[in-house]
Image (tube, rainbow, N blue to C red):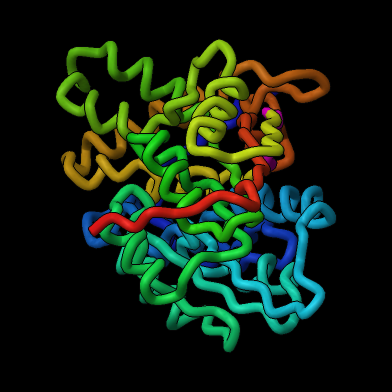
Amino acid sequence: MSERVLKVYDSNMYSNNINSNGNCTHNHTKNRTKITDEVKMHSAKRYHETNCMQRKDALDTILEYESIFRWTPEGNDTLLDIGCGTGDVTMDYIVPMAPPGSRIVAGDKSIEMVEYASTNFPHPRITYEELDIEKENHVNEILKKYGQFQHITSFCCLHWAMNQYEIMENIFNLLQPGGEVLMTVFQHHPLYEYYADMSENPKWSLYRPEMKISTSPYFRNENPEKELFLRIERAGFVDINVVLKERMYPFDSQVFIDSTVPVAPFLDHISQSHKDEFLQGYIEKVLTMKLPPPYRSNKERNDKKTIIPFCMLVAHARKPTHASTVLSP
């Protein structure tokens, strides 16, 4: 059996299409060229072209949990989507879930993401805003402008935050009494394992802090469900449900390669040769890692798919009906 070999190429060799099921497809062109410095490593456009795994996970979560959402009889609910990214998940999945009269504020800490979402995914019920959920002044500005929300969602975002207790408190303050939050947080991903391996290599030790920041705070935690539960509980939430979901996503092989770049921001700060070396090492790790039955290793597959196993923490909680919020000056 011949072994598969994947190499790092420029995404300009194809054009991506993302269908309503969250899957990425692409059309190949004849010329393959290596990644060049002109491509922004974590640009909004690049992220949108390769976020098919995040889209699929968000859709699966919404389909599983939408029945427990408590919408008002009037249907004029307010919802905040934290970490909306390029806006496609908000428009494609959250808008259809919410009542027709609802208003949605979609926030992201990246101005580039907010501008991309506003341009490419405008909707009369969505307002896009800059929001860094770790910054109290951002939270207070949103509160002053929109008031508290009845519902908050956040998909594939909050693992980027360094202070998990603080973001849970901020989410609590953004909710109306009796409001609810649904969030997903990455717990495990092969990229985290690769970061851990590379951090032990003296050649890459300079980038150890950035790799740590890019790794979920729940990675290699003995009881990540309990850890997240305690942080949510400490913020004041009740009726807390936290589940660790084991997922698999079958990437088109070239999309898998390009999906790594937007979620590894430190690659912006290293030379082109080091970028290629880093990515090629990660590709090799994914090709040779063991997959649970009945899957064969990615190196032995002949369907042009690359299976990525990952684990996601899914949490739903409510703010007590008697709770109050204190705005900071």
Q: Is residue 328 visible?
A: yes
Using the image, determine if residue 28 lies above or below residue 313. Answer: below
Using the image, determine if residue 70 lies above or below residue 65. Answer: below
In front: 269, or 310?
310
Query: Which quarter of the picture shows residue 229?
Result: top right
Spot occupied by residue 307 in the image (x, y as percentages of width and height): 66, 34
325 relative to 65 in the view: left or right: left
Residue at 58% x, 88% y is: 124
* Magenta part of the chain: 244-250
Q: Is residue 182 visible?
A: no
Spot occupied by residue 176 in the image (x, y as percentages of width and height): 57, 60
Using the image, determine if residue 104 lies above or below residue 51. Answer: below
Residue at 69% x, 20% y is: 291
115 relative to 299 in the view: left or right: left
Residue at 51% x, 15% y is: 221
Image quarter hosting the N terminus: top right
Image quarter hosting the C terminus: bottom left
In front: 28, or 72?
72
Q: How many marks?
A: 0
